[in-house]
Structures are given as structure tokens and as C-alpha cells.
Image: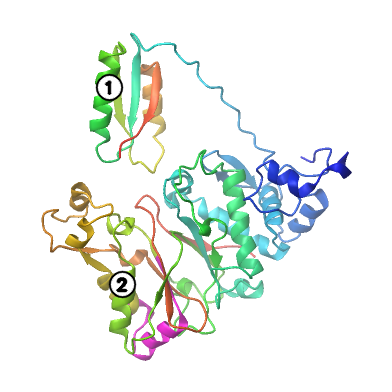
Amino acid sequence: MTNDLGFIDPTAGGARAKIALAPRPMDLAGKVIGMIDNTKEQADVILETAAEILRNRYGAAKVMIRRKEHFSRPASEALLNEMAKEVQVAAAALGG
Amino acid sequence: MAAAVDEFEFFLEKEWSDGFPVVTPTEARVRWMLAGTRRDPDEVVGHIPPAGEVATVRSVAIHALMAGCKPEYLPVVLGGIKIILREEFNMGGVQCTMHGVAPLMIVNGPYAERIGLHGGNGCFGPGFRANATIGRAIRLMLLNLGGGISGRASATVFSSPIRYTACLTENMASSPWESLAVSRGYSPQDNVITCAMAENPRLHFDDASTEPERLLTGIGDAMTAPGSWNMWFVSDMVVAMGPEHAKLCANAGLSRADVIGRLSKLAVRRQSSLKRGGNWRPERARAMGIDPDDDNAMVLAVKDPQRLHLIVAGGTGPITAVCHGWNMTSRAVHGTYDV
């Protein structure tokens, strides 16, 4: 942990693998898009409106909206796995 | 080359600090800090959210050292980080929230006294090494291992001064009551940490009341506010009563539990007042079982008296400090720690 300066890196020692970012698509035409409703008030209104634009203006094949348990809690593994299987592009979407 | 490197600048440039210089961790200094515990340095204490980097006894010691702790503070830092990582406390949520609450550590028991944790004059502020550095060690881990850095993982709008350090004990020498920990069923000899998500203390002056009802009515009013999440969520709140105010209540025959019960009823605001501004929304009122159209409905700041954490702290003077809380996804936690 000590570098050649004689100091300890306080952040070293973490064994977590770094995950590379997914490749970014150049357009959304024909893609299945996933959005997570964070449960804040009116998130559904905002996301449905955005979904309509994604379908009509950008040619998305389908927009899948799922709601997580609470905005201050991470989405569950089951929810993330379900979305990972079905969508090509996902956004953590907010209401408020 | 090493001689050319300014170690203080090095750590600040690396963003391995809270913005203040840190004690540079070297192998020798970390060995010195580890003398504060008998635990195996490689023992895993937990994973700090949201980044999830592992905290071991050694990495906790490194951060305690950086924060300026003495080795005898290490058991409190180890105990504190363990309790903060309990699922029901939802530290991960607070690491990412727009809000600015911090995990406030209230340490009770003989070990707190032995290491000089302070609960008297100025206990929320500067000048007390144990308070300043134990809380800072926790914060440095939340930054360095958890990645809860403002503008990155943390969406906090303002953050708050209480995010530099948030650790104190009660002023037991001047308290008319048992400690917070004893009120929860612990022995006075137990070393106990209670953590609740808290905003900065707001000071409530009352040098006029001569009996509890007026005093508690005023404190209760300070516990309510448009824009406070306590009004619309079942959440925690910390009230640090100055010894003068506590004695005024005790001399009138009120126990700690009596004061909690009374404050829970007096910390109330008419819905019409809350509708004038702040975070009132009809769906939030309905979620609390309140008809949004009933302007005369009374909204309690403390939905569950168990979640009002009353301590006696501070010095001589007619002041009580009120710390509003966060939301229902965090529940205050308490437990003993090993010394």
C-alpha cells in the first residue's frame, strides 16, 4: 500500500472489479429502452411523456418503465436483472 | 524525490481529504493507531456505500489517523462505522441524496468519558479533539471509501457543516435524567453509540419560560417547519436540550419520557400553515392519513415518539438545539461497541 513517496494510499486495497461503461448507441431507432421510476411524485407523468417522445420522435420500438421500491433505496437486483435482459438502453429516470 | 513532495498538498490534490490537511498516513503511524485495538487489521468491518469499497480494521485506522484521532479513539470509530453501515440506517441513501443530513453519533458510557468526548459547552463545535476527529474519520471514509463526494455520487444541494464531523456525548454531569442509552435499556456501564440522520442544530433560545409547558411549546414549534421532511415522513429527529431547560422540566417532575411524550404532541402545525410554502403536496398529506383539503388538520413533526432522540447536552444557558431529520428509509440505530 505504501507508494515510493512513503505515504499510504487510503483508498487502496479495494478488491472490487471496475466495470467498463456499456457502449453508447448512436441512435435509438428500433431499440427497447428501459427507464426506472424512482417513485418521486409525478415521475410517472414525466416518464410517460418522455417515452412518447422517444417512440414518436426517435423511433424507439418500446419503452419499458419499471418502478423501484423507494427513491432513497437502490433498485433491487431482480429489477435490474429483468431490465438488463429486456432493454438495450436504460436510464435511471427521475420524477419530482 | 520524496523530499520535494509536500505531503499536505499531495493529499489535498489527490482528493483524499475533506478539504482540510490530513495527518499523512505512513506505515509507522498506522501501526501506532492500530495499537488502539486488539482486532486483526485485516478483519473486514463492512463495505461503504455507494462505491462499496471495503473497510477493514486497517483502513479504518488509516482514516482515523488522517482525521487526527488518538489510538484510544479507534474503538469508537470502529464501532461507529459498523453501526452506520446497518441496513436500516440506509447510509447509502444519504450518501446520494439531495439533502444535507449527516449521521450524528451520540456516544454514551464510561469509555466516551475516558477518552474525553465532550457533551458540554460548545459540544457541536470546534475545540474538542475527540468530537472533531472521530466524526471526521467517519466522514473521510464516507468520502474515500464510499465515494459520497458532492457533485459526483452525492447529489447534495448544500451539504452542511455537520458533514465535517458529527459526534458528541451527553452532558451527564449536568443532566437530571438517565442517559439516552440507559433510557433504551442499556446499563450505565455499557458503551453505546446511537446514530440518527440529522440536519445542523438549530438553536432555540428560551430565557423567558418558568414552567415546562411554555418551554416545550416553543421547542415543539421549532421542531416543525414548512420545508422540513419531518412534517411529511415518519423520520428521526434529535433534540439536544440544554441542561437549564432539562432541569426546568425535571424540577417540575417531568421524566425524560414525559418530555418526549409532550414534545411529540406539541411539535405540531396546522396544515394551512404548511400549505403556504415548502414541500406540502396533496399526495404527501394523504400518505400521512391527512385530508389535503382540511386546512385545520394538525400535522405532527414526530409521527413516532420512539424516533425522537432527546439528549441533554451543551453548557449553561437557556438554549435547546433542534436537529431535523431525513426520511422514512433511514431508521436511527444504536448498539454497544467493544473497547
Visual colour scheme: rainbow
Quadrant housing residue A68: top left
**Residue farthest along the top direction in this orientation:** A30
Check the picture and name the quadrant holding the N terminus of chain B.
top right
Report the front residue among B119 and B177: B119
Q: Amino acid at mark 2?
A: Gly
Helix, strand or loop under label 2: helix
Q: Amino acid at mark 1?
A: Ala
Q: Disc 1 designates what residue? A: A51
Residue B264: give x, y in percent of width and height: 29, 70
Residue B196: give x, y in percent of width and height: 45, 60
Judge whether residue B180 is colored magenta.
Answer: no
Q: Chain of mark 1?
A: A
Tell me the residue at 20%/53% (across/down): B285
Q: Is residue B256 above or below residue B160?
A: below
Q: Which mark is residue B220?
A: 2
Tell me the residue at 79%/41% (across/down): A2
Tell me the residue at 39%/22% (across/down): A90
Q: Is residue B320 above or below residue B238?
A: below
Q: Is residue B101 above or below residue B119?
A: above
Q: Chain of mark 2?
A: B
Residue B2: give x, y in percent of width and height: 86, 42
**Labels 2 & 1 near each other (Cβ < 8 A):** no
Within 10 Å of disc 1 (Cα), the crowding (few <14, some 14-19, many 20+) is many
Within 10 Å of disc 2 (Cα), the crowding (few <14, some 14-19, many 20+) is many
Tell me the residue at 15%/62% (across/down): B297
Inter-mark Cα distance, 2 to 1: 46 Å
Check the picture and name the quadrant holding the C terminus of chain B.
bottom right
Q: Which residues are magenta?
A: B238-258
Residue B140: give x, y in percent of width and height: 62, 50
Question: Horizontally, is B58 left or right of B53 in the view?
Answer: right
